[in-house]
């Protein structure tokens, strides 16, 4: 997975799904905001690419901004498409797979509660 850390310029608007491009047979990520209290990262998954099961110490909020992704959260499969949002709870194993190419915004807030 390639990660670019070019943070966004402040006081300017951006087209969210244009902040990152697809790459053949790859997952691309770009951190667009990073603070001690959390991060905003956009991801572009090519078809059939995914992240294996893992967990995080904090809730992770996913907003799908293009295409469709399949998520497995605590063993339960869930599909989400462009315009949909979901929360992956802290300490619960989850995985992500691209059913077809898709992009998502991941918001990680480093707090006990969101």
Image (tube, grey):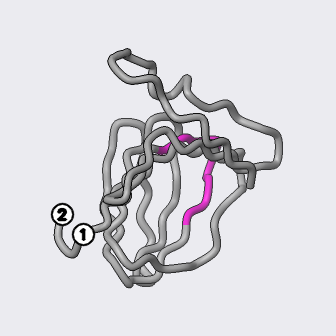
Q: Residue 43, percent across and down?
A: 57, 45
Secondary structure of the magenta portion, mostly?
strand
Residue with the most extreme left position = 113
Q: Is there CB contact under 8 Å for labels 1 and 2? A: yes
Q: Is residue 9 above or below residue 79?
A: above
Q: How many marks?
A: 2
Write the residue at 31% across / 69% down: 59
Q: Which residue is mark 1?
A: 111
Write the residue at 31% across / 74% down: 89
Q: Quick check: 58 left or right of 101?
A: left
Q: Nearer the viewer, residue 74 or 8?
A: 8
Q: Quick check: 71 left or right of 113?
A: right
Q: Nearer the viewer, residue 99 or 92?
A: 92
Q: Which residues are magenta?
A: 96-104
Q: Residue 6, percent across and down?
A: 60, 35
Q: Nearer the viewer, residue 43 or 74?
A: 43
Q: CA distance from mark 1 to mark 2?
A: 7 Å
Q: Quick check: 109 left or right of 105?
A: left
Q: Which residue is mark 2?
A: 114
Residue with the most extreme top position = 12
**Where's the N terminus, which quadrant?**
bottom right
Q: Residues within 10 Å of mark 1 (few under 14, many from 20)?
A: few
Q: Quick check: 105 left or right of 27?
A: left
Residue with the most extreme right position = 24
Write the residue at 36% across / 63% down: 60
Q: Residue 102, percent across and down?
A: 57, 42
Q: Is residue 43 above or below residue 22?
A: below
Tell me, yes or no, whether the highlighted magenta stretch contains residue 101: yes
Camera-side mark, 1 or 2: 1
């Amino acid at each position: 997975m390639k990660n670019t850390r070019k943070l966004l310029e402040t006081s300017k608007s951006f087209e969210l799904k244009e902040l990152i491009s697809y790459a053949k047979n790859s997952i691309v990520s770009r951190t667009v905001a990073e603070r001690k209290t959390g991060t905003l990262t956009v991801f572009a998954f090519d078809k059939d690419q995914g992240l294996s099961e893992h967990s995080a110490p904090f809730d992770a909020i996913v907003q799908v901004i293009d295409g469709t992704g399949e998520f497995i959260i605590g063993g339960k499969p869930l599909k989400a498409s462009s315009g949909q949002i979901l929360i992956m709870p802290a300490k619960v194993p989850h995985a992500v797979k691209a059913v077809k190419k898709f992009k998502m915004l991941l918001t990680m807030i480093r707090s006990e509660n969101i």
